[in-house]
Image: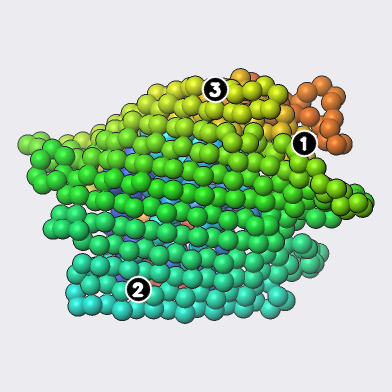
Amino acid sequence: MALSIIVNMLLINYLQGQVETPKDTTRIMLSEVVITAGRMPMPTIWLPDAISSKDIDSKLFTTYRTNPEALIDEAGVFVQKTNHGGGSPFLRGLTGNQVLFLFDGIRLSNSTMRYGPNQLLNTVNMYGIERVELLHGGGSVEYGSDALGGSIQLFSVEQPFSSPNDFNGRLFTRMITGNMEQTVNGRLGFGNQKLALTTGATGRHFGDLTGGDTTGLQSPNAYDEVDFDIKLKAKAGKNSVLTFFFQRVHQSGVDVYHKVALENYSIHRMNPQLRNLIYVKLEQLLGDGFFNKLTITPSYQFSAEQRQIQKNGSRIFREERDEVATKGFIAELFTGKAIDWGSLRGNTGFEVYNDLVRSNRTDTDLSNGSVISKRGLYPDNSTNLSMGFFSSQSLELRRWVINAGLRFSFFKAEINETDLGNIVLNTNALVGNTGITFKSGNYSGIFLSVNSGFRAPNMDDLGTLGIVDFRYEVPNYDLSPQRSMQLQLGYRLRNKRSAIEVYAYQNRLNNLIVRSRLGNDSIEGYPVYLKENVEKAVIRGFEASLKQSIGKNISLKEISLTLTDKTSQNRNRFAEFRHCLEV
């Protein structure tokens, strides 16, 4: 079946050689440039990676309601949603803390990211996003821990410098009947030769979801959201650009539907759920030497999740609150040099992130008003430090492109436990990647790549104490990093009328951290689990997609096929076929 699809793709490409192509299709298919694969703008056609990008901003005013929904029709991506305020993408069979999330080059994933589906992607204002890039199966060399299944990077709306002065704005409203959604979004922009400013605000209300014939009303699923962002770029000199960015997302009353529907809760909601991000970025051109550009990016993030919980028939009302304050710093030097027999480009840098985790819990007896303070889900006032040194280079030699990268990372977790005292854990990881691409034509290439990845144990792995989904978890402070080794073979063609991509891969995972049942113990009616490094797995897969211009006003927007086979203690297989015809 896979071979038949490839043959059909190539046949369609050949037969449509003389068909007139719309200009917008030409632009999309021929000249796509991405950033995530090498931390700098690079043409997709010669990359030894499976990477795709999607312009989000232009499509927001049609069908998408949330960020996870915007990825549902993306080739090679499966999105899981059990409540409307969540939504977790799977890349190559993995999700949760095994997929890395980034925003404008800054890590969104922090030390409380949990194993399995989570709501992080939905805590970014979708009306402040211009583009999303998905790197399938890679990212550890470029960005560090967590990219076992791949990396997803979101890019903020950009206001360009302009001459003459440019004022612009938009106002968007949307209402869905049945009280399912009311949204108001406004954005203003200004640009001249030295300044570029864009700012936006969004207010949203989601009601309970109304399903189809046999589904009916899915309640509770409602929540409210208020967002704000501002981005200011200024030319600090002839060769310098300074960027200031601030984003705030505040969601309230985010009900977790499956907890109420399946686990006997009368109340289980996040109220509030918020995330703030602020960064300053300096871009300095250095001239025509070996290093031609320097960037420095300090950042600060704050996220908070407060859970309100009550079981049916119980008089105990529980509130749990987790906060993560993250200080970050990135410094990079970029290379771009023409040589006698080709060209060399790449980047070398250093980054550090430090998480301060605060966690607490209170149980209120509604019958008498008494309040008891207890340990939170994570050890309170603990820190998680990560540092990484990395270098990624690309050498182009006529019909060959060689890519190679290396990263060394160091991690230090300091955990404060009431009973055990102060616990300090140190670990490190060395990973690399290499890929070679052969230019089989002016607009096509065949590549082979190998990359290693890792995920260091975070605070959720080490220190979780409490109810998580359908189990009760207890801490384990004797964990080591998970490892991956991926081999990938790919073919990519992009010309004025076609975009064909075919990938086959095998990802071997070792030292996986999984939940192990502790005998027959139970707490609060839940089985007790402990995380341990006791599992390994092999994930094999095949991904293929086709975008084809058929005529001046008709295009086959996408045909895609995804096959995933995950072999571990429990074997999982997944297959998906999609197509979309656009007129």
Q: Nearer the viewer, residue 466 or 168?
A: 466
Residue 115, percent across and down?
62, 37
* Apparent side of residue 283 relative to residue 185 in the rendered image (left or right): left
Question: Which residue is identified by label 2?
Answer: 189
Rendered image quadrant of residue 190? bottom left
Residue 477 in sight from this viewpoint: yes
Residue 112 versus residue 163 in the image, above or below: above
Q: Mark 3 against mark 1, which lies toward the viewer? A: 3
Sequence-first tag of 2 and 1:
2
- Vertical comparison of 235 with 262: above or below: below
At x 64%, y 23%, the residue is 421
Q: Which residue is located at x 19 percent, y 78 percent? A: 164
Residue annotated with mark 3? 424
**Mark nearer the viewer, 2 or 3:** 3
Q: Amino acid at mark 1?
A: Arg
Q: Position of residue 151 (x, y in %)?
A: 46, 43
Quadrant of the rendered image containing residue 410: top left
Numbered disc 3: secondary structure: strand
Q: Amino acid at mark 3?
A: Val
Determine which of the numbered discs, if any, sits on residue 471 in the image.
1
10 Å crowding of disc 3: few (<14), some (14-19), many (20+):
few
The answer to whether marks 3 and 1 mark residues whose Cβ atoms lie closer than 8 Å is no
Q: Mark 1, residues whose alpha carbon is within 10 Å: few (<14), some, or many (≥20)? A: some
Task: Specify whether residue 445 is in view.
Answer: no
Who is closer to the viewer here, 90 or 482? 482
Residue at 62% over, 55% down:
273
Q: Regarding mark 1 in the picture, which secondary structure is present there?
A: strand
**Residue at mark 2 to residue at mark 1: CA–CA distance:** 49 Å
Q: Amino acid at mark 2?
A: Gly
Name which quarter of the figure residue 472 lies in. Answer: top right
Say which mark, if any, is on residue 534. Answer: none
